[in-house]
Amino acid sequence: MRTQNYSRKRQAIYELLLSTKEHPSAEWIYNSLKSEYPDLSLGTVYRNLKLLEENGTVKSVAVVDGRERYDALMSPHSHFVCSKCGRVIDVFFQNEISNIADNLRIDGVKEINSFSLIYYGICDKCFFNT
Amino acid sequence: MRTQNYSRKRQAIYELLLSTKEHPSAEWIYNSLKSEYPDLSLGTVYRNLKLLEENGTVKSVAVVDGRERYDALMSPHSHFVCSKCGRVIDVFFQNEISNIADNLRIDGVKEINSFSLIYYGICDKCFFNT
DNA sequence: AACAAGAAAGATAATAATTATTGATTTCTT
DNA sequence: AAGAAATCAATAATTATTATCTTTCTTGTT
């Protein structure tokens, strides 16, 4: 039985994810932690994000411009993605959809375990910065 | 002023997409058409999928295992993705969610133009093939 | 039917995000 | 403190997708 050892870098990655609403990409995390952990490598960020995701500690909530975006907020919620700047914003309105999903019967589908709802549009900042 | 010329390959790609419920990837399309069009190249498939998507003729409906999956069925609907085999299945139940999206106000969001709802779970085939 | 201009094609090289590998270092267990 | 196990950084490898470049089609016009 393999346990997971403690890792200072992993904790830093997780705490950064917890503390921000940026829904950052691996590279954003890497750049943000680089000053405090100069010997951090991008591979470590990728590896630990994957680990944390498998753990169920964090979630990949969207792929924006080909980059996976992560969130440590695990309470069920959706996301808005700005089509211009790629910003990801939390949307705390999902109960209705959860109810729908729970009662949904789809031909060819045995069970629904989760769903991902992403709204697309224009955020305030992009709208006023034309 | 640039017009779009007729292209036999592009038509074949589009018709294949129209005729199938596979929600295929670029490579699937490439392999499917290879026998009828031996000189087809993968780049052409990618190029035309992008063109058709910009046209509004087809849509990318999901990314499964890192591969973009396309659909020529443009009526508003959602999709189910099997977490085991990656199969993509149409879900024709979206009116309620559309209504919700239309009346949603999100802090920091100016306008919502579209949304993508993807259900995840296990399909019939994978469930019975354990 | 031939022609010319622009679009599309195939082939190949190039990108870019992510994953795997490896040898050195850190953390855990005892 | 010592051996075992996990992590780390650096680097190489993968993989999906995009760009480039030359040739081949399409199409409107003589």
Image (tube, coloured by chain):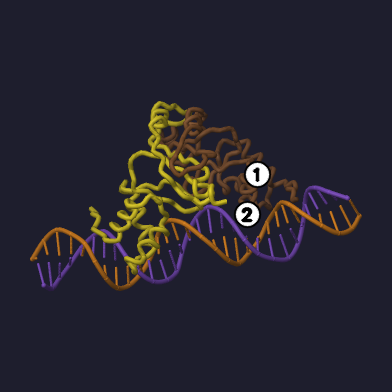
Chain colours: A brown, B yellow, C purple, D orange
Seen from the viewer's position, the closer of residues A26 and B120 is: B120
Q: Residue at x 36, y 38 (%)?
A: B76
Return the mark for residue A43. Answer: 2
Q: Residues within 10 Å of mark 2 (few under 14, many from 20)?
A: few
SS at mark 1 in the image: helix
Residue A125 horizontal side relative to residue C8, left or right:
right
**In front: label 2 or label 1:** 1
* Kind of residue sitting beneath label 2: Gly
Percent of width and height locating residue B60: 40, 48
Q: Chain of mark 2?
A: A
Residue A42, image x, y percentages: 61, 53
Q: Nearer the viewer, residue D8 or B41?
A: B41
Q: Secondary structure at mark 2?
A: helix
Q: CA distance from mark 2 to mark 1?
A: 18 Å
Instruction: Rate crowding at label 1 as few (under 14), some (14 to 19) or many (20 or more) other CA atoms within 10 Å.
Output: few
Do the residues at pointers 2 and 1 share their chain?
Answer: yes
First in sequence: mark 2 vs mark 1: 2
Q: Which percent across, then down, holds residue B6? A: 24, 58
The residue at which mark 1 appears reads as: A55
Task: Name the chain under label 1.
Answer: A
